[in-house]
Amino acid sequence: MDVVFLSRLQFAITIMFHYLFPPLTIGMGLVLVYLEAMFLRTREPIYESAARFWTKLFAINFAVGVASGITMVFQFGTNWAGYSRYVGDVFGAALAAEAIFAFFLESGFLAILVFGWDKVSPRMHFFSTLMVFLGSVFSSIWITVANSWQQTPAGFHIVRHVIDGQSYPRAEVVNFAQVVFNPSTVDRLVHVWLGAFIMGTFFILSVSAWYLLKGRHLEMARRSFTGALVLAAITCLLQLVSGDHQAKMVAAQQPAKLAAYEGIYHTSAPGQGTPLYLFGVVNDQAGKVTGISIPKMLSFLVYTNFNKPVPGLDQLEKDYGKPPVQIAFQAYHLMVGIGFLFIGLTLVALFCRWRGTLFDQRWLLWCFVVAVIPAFAANELGWVAAEVGRQPWIVYPTLVNGVVTGGLKTSAAVSETLLQPGGAATVLTSIIMFGLIYLLLLAVWVYVLNDKIQHGPEPIGPSGKPPRRGLMDAAASVAGHAESLTNGHAPGTPGTPGTPGTPGTPGISGTDGNGANGSPEVHPQA
């Protein structure tokens, strides 16, 4: 019933649930741009069919992501008033930039992406898709900038403010460029982007592999699987390079975090080097890790020197404190292990695709069906390692002339009102309520997503499409709320290509009771 722990737990639950969706939409957005670009280049209807289908799933994920992210902001005031006072000037600028440069761009073109298929030209629709994708990327920039500043603060000074007779420190911006390009921003941003691309591509690989195994929508599934596989393999290999670069940054900027990641309780003697653990069991009380390690490898990876020891917690704990080693160690190693697993899986699949045997390897396709779960897990574990590894600091201290200064400890960031009697019970009650609401939201997401996947893509014929209309006409048609966000057309509307509403099934446009396509047009691969 410690109020600081409960407040951290509440924020962890809400943000980890929310973070299921942003990387998924960023990764899927890139694939949508690819599919529509291929349609513009080749004019093959199969690319449009695939793009329409994945847009429906993108819209579902986008909607749930927005809904689940709203509650996080309120916790800055309800649970973390001390933190808000300290970082308000820095965080406010970053979040304002996110709203102006990212959210308006993304949401402004979202309606055209979802509803504009038969209302604007293909080039205009492609432009809208590109803007939505870029909007999601810009959003990730500013959120990552704000979080990276907490990890490696720069471009600020501390000003003491007196509130109700009590003095509080406040970080105020003196150089906005240094705030944005603090020592960890670029490394962490690249890592976040690559993780998002891996998440989006593995989601598409999972659904496409399932269609291939079931013998459904084969042409669309083959095209989607091949494109996503190439992108997944490239991003997995790039993530390996990014991870190595980021680990060196952490060693320089947050040495106690790296010590927790690698379970370094004691600094090795000069000339012995520091081992790299592949996996292990942490005994925090004894201050050691039991597992399989490569001698001196961590020293080589960090310093390109096998004999230079990496500082352990015995040297760092006095200045930086001791992070929860068990959680940081296991989360970090699981994330890295999943990364290597994905590299091997995608390279094997690419080799089979080159040989022309990929779609005959049912065991490999089943691997991709379930691989979406560790893809979700890797994105979550990366953030768990990053956030737990900086404890006991919520804003990490800086090293000035060899002296650790500044920073804000997590214990000092919680709202003062929650420290009063009954505060812990209040937080616990809200955790239970949030948990129930998010469980319901998760069930709705899974149900709707499964319904769209089971229904599959609509066949796109070469003729019978209604004439394209202008941008203002497209906007006017949506103003009456007659169209469905996840369908992209009015359910049951006569004349919609391939989806004439079937009486008696208002919930599934253009299908009979068994989910079979009710269109008079039959695509060759349907």
Image (cartoon, grey):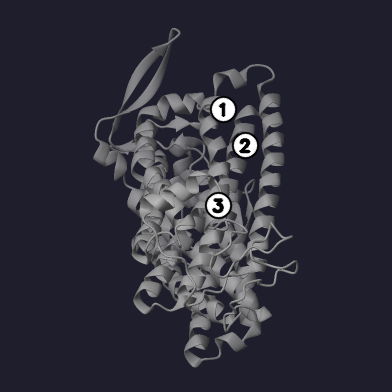
**Circle 1: element type:** loop
Residue under label 3: 483
Residue under label 1: 79
Q: CA distance from mark 2 to mark 1?
A: 9 Å
Residue under label 2: 10
Earlier sequence position, callout 2 versus callout 1: 2
* Relative image position of residue 180 (x, y in whole percent): 30, 42
Residue 492, compared with residue 424, is above or below; it is below
Is 399 positioned to the left or the right of 117 in the image?
Answer: left
Circle 2 crowding by C-alpha within 10 Å: few under 14, some 14–19, many from 20: many
Earlier sequence position, callout 2 versus callout 3: 2
Q: CA distance from mark 2 to mark 3?
A: 36 Å
Amino acid beneath label 3: Glu
Q: CA distance from mark 3 to mark 1?
A: 39 Å
Q: Quadrant of the N terminus?
A: top right
Circle 1 crowding by C-alpha within 10 Å: few under 14, some 14–19, many from 20: many
Q: In the depicted view, which residue is nearer to us: 232 or 467?
A: 467
Asked if one can make out residue 276 in the rendered structure from this viewpoint, the answer is no
* Relative image position of residue 502 (x, y in whole percent): 68, 64
**Circle 2: element type:** helix
Instruction: Specify the farthest residue to the top.
Output: 165
Asked if one can make out residue 258 in the rendered structure from this viewpoint, the answer is yes
